[in-house]
Image (cartoon, grey):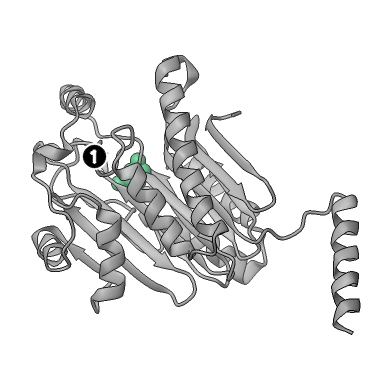
Amino acid sequence: MNNIKWISGLILLIGLMGFGIPTKPQYAIAIHGGAGVILKANLSAGMEKAYRHMLDSALTVGEKVLASGGSSMDAVEKVIRIMEDCPLFNAGKGAVYSHDGYNDLDAAVMDGSNLMAGAVAGVRNVKNPITLARRVMTNSPHVMLSGKGATEFAREQGLEIVDSSYFFTERRWKDLQNAIAREKENKFGTVGCVAMDKAGNLAAGTSTGGMTNKKWNRIGDTPIIGAGTYASNKSCAVSGTGHGEFFIRYTVAREIAALMEYKGMSVQKAAEEVIINRLKPAGGEGGIIAVDKDGNIALVFNSPGMYRGAADSNGRHEIAIFGDK
Ligand code: ASP
């Protein structure tokens, strides 16, 4: 009896593949390295190569975690740590500077299987804020910690504490001087990861330095659950990047999940509804990556480009930067 079931299952699978009907992947993962005015004309060949290489290696590490049966949360944390350690991205080493010349880091994670979440805001001395966000979720009774208190908690948890000079990069320092000269706030290069593991659990994580030249301890959407980061096994896992104030006011990540839950939209349609139909006309530049409970991935942005990557157990593995690829 069991053999018959097994054989008919196999025949069905081969049939579906033969007709080109996509089969649900065992796992799926997507990453982003920020959205904004990313144009081929403004990116040197060397920089483009470096970004593609880093996105590809981070994505590959995440795939390996999931392929070997690891949890979506482990994949999200591991991938984001790699991107935080890389000076190309606006998170961890490579974070942008606030107006006062500090790197104020924000990060969040959410576990779609139980709706647990952890976030940190305005952290200055923690090497990997994404790991601290996860510890807030698992080892504290709270959802969000900020500033000195968050660093104190990181110390208690035995996480790596670094001198603020660790976050110095020439490029971001110059960006600050330019932004001050133009009296503007700029954004770029936040990192994020969403994943579905073999057990069908979803997880999301996002990490950022926020916006260059930000003032008054401004906090963006990244650490706000439902704005820049959200996950629920009922719908999808989302990580956003872009003009944080808009993501907060439009509760972007939760809105996408709600459209799926209450309106039965696909993850792609729900993301387009929020990012293209609502956010864009309002002037909110940015994008999201999302994965649903069936492993479908959406990479949607209303800016000229978004550093991004997607992979699943059906053999998908792609990296892209600009609007077309
Ligand atoms: N969303 C981030 C913020 O507003 C910035 C970014 O994604 O580039 O803090």
Left or right of 46? Residue 164 is: left
Q: Residues within 10 Å of mark 1 (few under 14, many from 20)?
A: many
Q: Can you name the residue that lies furthest to the bottom here? A: 1
Location of residue 142 (image quadrant): bottom left
- Residue at 16% of width from left, 42% of height from top? 103
Left or right of 308? Residue 85 is: left
Mark 1 secondary-structure assignment: loop
Can residue 243 be seen here? The reply is no
Report the quarter where the N terminus lies.
bottom right
- What amino acid is at disc 1? Lys
Can residue 275 be seen here? The reply is yes
- Residue at 87% of width from left, 78% of height from top? 3
Q: Residue 21 in the image: x percent, y percent?
A: 83, 54
Q: Nearer the viewer, residue 70 or 21?
A: 70
**Residue where numbered disc 1 is placed:** 93
Report the quarter where the C terminus lies.
top right
Q: Residue 283 in the image: x percent, y percent?
A: 43, 39
